[in-house]
Amino acid sequence: MIEHALYLSVALFCLGVLGVITRRNVFVVFMAIELMLNGANLGFIAFARLHESMDGHVLALLVMAVAAAEAALALAVIILLHKHKGKLDTNVFNLLRG
Amino acid sequence: MMHHSALLLPMVILPLAGAFVLGVLRLATVRERGMAAHHFGIIAAFGPILSFLLALGLLVQINGLPGHDRVLSQSLYQWFAVGEMRVNFGLMADPLAVLMVLFVTFVGSLIHIYSIGYMKGDPNAGAFFAYLNLFLGAMLILVLGSGPLVMFVGWEGVGLCSYLLISYYNDDRANVAAGNKAFIVNRIGDLGFILGLALLFWAIGDTGFDYADLRERAPELTPLLALTVGLLLFIGATGKSAQLPLYVWLPDAMAGPTPVSALIHAATMVTAGVYMVARFSFLYMQSVPAGVIIAWVGILTALLGAIFGMFQRDIKKILAYSTISQLGYMFVGVGLAAYSAGIFHVFTHAFFKALLFLGAGSVITALHHQQDIWRMGGLKKRLPITYVTMLIGALALAGVPPLAGFFSKDEILVAALATGHPVIWLLGILVAGMTAYYTFRLIFVVFHGTPRDAHYEEVTESLRVMTIPLMILAAGAVLAGFINLPPILGGHQLLSHWLGLEAHHSPHIKLELLTILASLTVCAVGIGIAYRRFIPTAVEPVYHGFARFAEAKFHVDELYDSLFVQPLLGAGAAIRRVVEPRIVDGPVQAVVWLYRAGADAVSAVQSGYVRVYAIYMVVGVGLLSFAVYRLLVG
């Protein structure tokens, strides 16, 4: 039973990573990151169940709080990015190019 | 035993402080219309005049000491210490140095005053007067230094000021080239000087490097070492005092303002070499051959200078070659160990040559910067004061008794005969005749005959601030010879006894009579020939053969140019073309290329795309996780 939950968690996380790497729309990348966070949260809950401890639950709640804060911040950044360039394509934002 | 004197430091400091104040004032006012030239001049005259008064005080002080122990000194601070060696920066004055500072500050004061008139209206006069004061300070350091190293500071200082003042009119490239030439030729001489000092230090310098220490240990030098050191130091002197083969810079140095030619390139700086040999008399006493070589170089230079002087047409060049020639006499004197005779000639020459140069400056300004004697003529009526004073200077230079040049020149010639060098004596007599000829050629062509200048009617005598120094120097040129009257003429050789540089020998009555008769004869002949040629009217001659060769200065400049200058320039160009790009720059460029290629390779990683960085992160975290897993589990 636990294994299934863990498989789902890893699958969600990998989907998130894939989304981050392959998608070019900033919004989709952001959603992929949320997916990775949720994958990790599922892992925490599954291990908490396995070890019958509350630590995992606490951590999952913390991650949710951080994710909410991060969402507020990231959305503001995305609005600014759009104001600046008029696009949300990550390829446009390549100032760090060496 | 040395005696302390507090006068030495202020004497050196005053002109240097003047230079500083003038420099600051000049920089402060250069942006606006600037201070008037004569204001700078009046400030500049303070330092030299006060130094002269201090020098008089020094004379009184030194005469109050017992006859055998006349050394005043002032130790200032420890200059540097290397290992056991301590070199102090100190000042020292003995009768020789006191005589030098007396006439340097006296002539210097007069020339500063004269310059107030000469530089009137010059926009850069502030710099001029600052350099002039700086020169005087450096010259006093040279003369009053307590050791060879302190002397060297002054030696280089006067060279620097000479350079700055020769190229003072720097809007003409030729003047800048003349300044460079003087500086570079002097560097060649200075190399010899430095090597000489180094050798001297290596031999006997380990217990102290002041004159007093060196004098004590000079007898320890082997004859060969004394000869080598003596000749190396003399190479320095040939540069500074314009002797063969390094005399070439002095005629070009006439590009500077005329007061500079009078002060630096006639009266004071160029005699530094003679002073140096006299200062190192303890060394040259250890090596007679070194002295004889110096005397021969001196007499040959005197001859060459006189030959060139006879055929020049630029009034200042004539005087410049005359200076070279007279410096040659001085080296004959100091070379043959007749130090007081050589220094006596330095002393008298300072008066009459400064006088002649200042007179020439007066003529040049009156004619609006005309320097060609064949464009002058008949100026006697227009410039009466300049004429009379220059005539006195010319008589003194030609060696007409009882003016200054007569006594000092004859004393050197007597010394040549007394030490057994009849050839030097004969050449000296010959040069005396030539000197009389070219000096009066100048006087007759410039002041007598018919006017050749287009603006003759408008020519007026110079300002009084210029003529009064002329008159004072003329009085000096008349009287300076009497301070060392030989016994044969009823004197007591006061100066020689006072200087005390050499042992006193009984006077050679016969030799002196012979010399006086011979020099009077050639002097009369020289003036006579000039009179017959240029009176009543002088016609500009066209030179042929030898005369033409001499007018072209034997093509020595061209010879040096093709022998040294061009090969060096060629070598420089070759180095720039081959060695610089291939050997020096090659490895440097290779390193640059290497770093640039490395940077290009690494910077490809920095794509600037967020998702690429995400891949790096995933790969990195993956590898890290794997490593941690291996560490913990397997």
Image (tube, coloured by chain):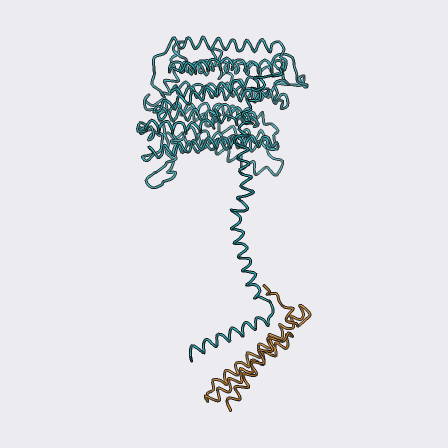
In percent of width and height, residue B551 lies at 57, 20
At a point 50% along the width and 20% down the height, the residue shown is B304
Quarter holding residue A11: bottom right
Which quadrant of the figure has residue B491?
top left
Q: In the visual, does B625 lie left or right of B283?
A: right
Left or right of B507? Residue B351 is right
* B593 to B286, vertically: above or below: below
Q: Which one is in front, A53 or B30? A: A53
Q: Is residue B624 left or right of residue B359?
A: left
Chain B rendered in what hue?
cyan
Residue lying at the far bottom of the rendered structure: A1
Residue B373, x across and y down, in percent:
61, 18
Residue B250 pos. (x, y %): 52, 26
The percent coordinates of residue B224 (x first, y second) are: 35, 28
The chain drawn in orange is A
Q: Is residue B218 above or below residue B590?
A: above
Image quarter hosting the C terminus of chain B: bottom left
